[in-house]
Image: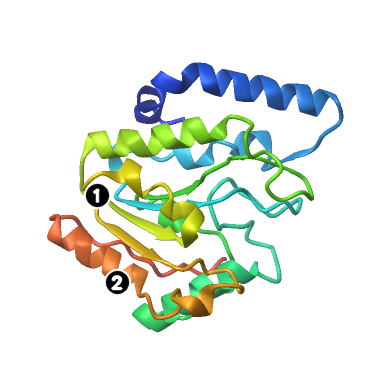
Amino acid sequence: MDPGWVRALSPVASDLERVVAALAERSASGEHYLPPADAVLRAFQEPFDHVRVLIVGQDPYPTPGHSIGLAFAVEPHVRPLPRSLKNIYRELADDLGVEMPLHGDLRHWAEQGVLLLNRVLTVKAGVAGSHHGLGWEAITARAITALVERGGPLVAILWGRHAQKLQPLLGDVPVIASAHPSPLSARNGFFGSRPFSRANAVLAQQGAAPVEWTIPAQD
């Protein structure tokens, strides 16, 4: 983890130790969890002080070989793209006029200070939502609280009711809320919500540089 994140998460260090121990125990009993161990804390590898946009997901994709430890992102080779991510890209194209990417690697966003934070950071392979209640919720709540305590520039993009339940933690942080990009709900307010241009407008109001949302092509 980035040293700034180590300090920010120090109040929940014991919670993190318990989760790691629980994962080790499950792994020893034969459970395969995702993402790979070296990617579980991927969201916290970029500098804490550089975070300027928060996007909250639920938990990693449960399909082996997909998750890279960043909410909504997948390994570059994954085809077809997850349907929620395809809808995110459709809205990105409609919002900013950029060409829809062919891959789902969102590290370009993370490297610019977009924190792609799943509420729960691991999942049993093949079983969505299987690690809810394992202890991750306290850790990710602390991550959000630490950003609020740090202060701006910061804007939160909350897609769907699950993410929007976190709004009380955000205090005075500007929030862009809409329906989730899932195929089940995207037409109920996600499409047309223009979260990317709106986030950049908020950042400009805070005196910060915009995010370059265009996803570079893979070599």
Q: Secondary structure at mark 1?
A: loop
Lower position in the chain sequence, tag 2 or tag 1: 1
**In this rendering, the label closer to the viewer, 2 or 1:** 1
Question: Taking the image as drawn, is residue 101 in sight?
Answer: no
Q: Position of residue 109 (x, y in %)?
A: 42, 57
Q: Position of residue 200 (x, y in %)?
A: 26, 65
Q: Residue at x 48, y 42 (%)?
A: 43
The one nearer the camera, 199 or 4, is 199
What residue is disc 2 on? 197
Q: The residue under label 2 is which amino acid type?
A: Ser
The one nearer the camera, 185 or 105, is 185
Q: Position of residue 187 (x, y in %)?
A: 51, 80
Q: Determine crowd level at label 2: few under 14, some 14-19, many 20+ residues with C-alpha closer than 10 A.
A: some
Question: Taking the image as drawn, is residue 187 in sight?
Answer: yes
What kind of colouring is applied to the model shown? rainbow
Q: Residue at x 36, y 79 (%)?
A: 95
Tell which residue pokes out farthest to the right in this image. Answer: 30
What residue is disc 1 on? 173
* Left-right relation of 153 to 108: left
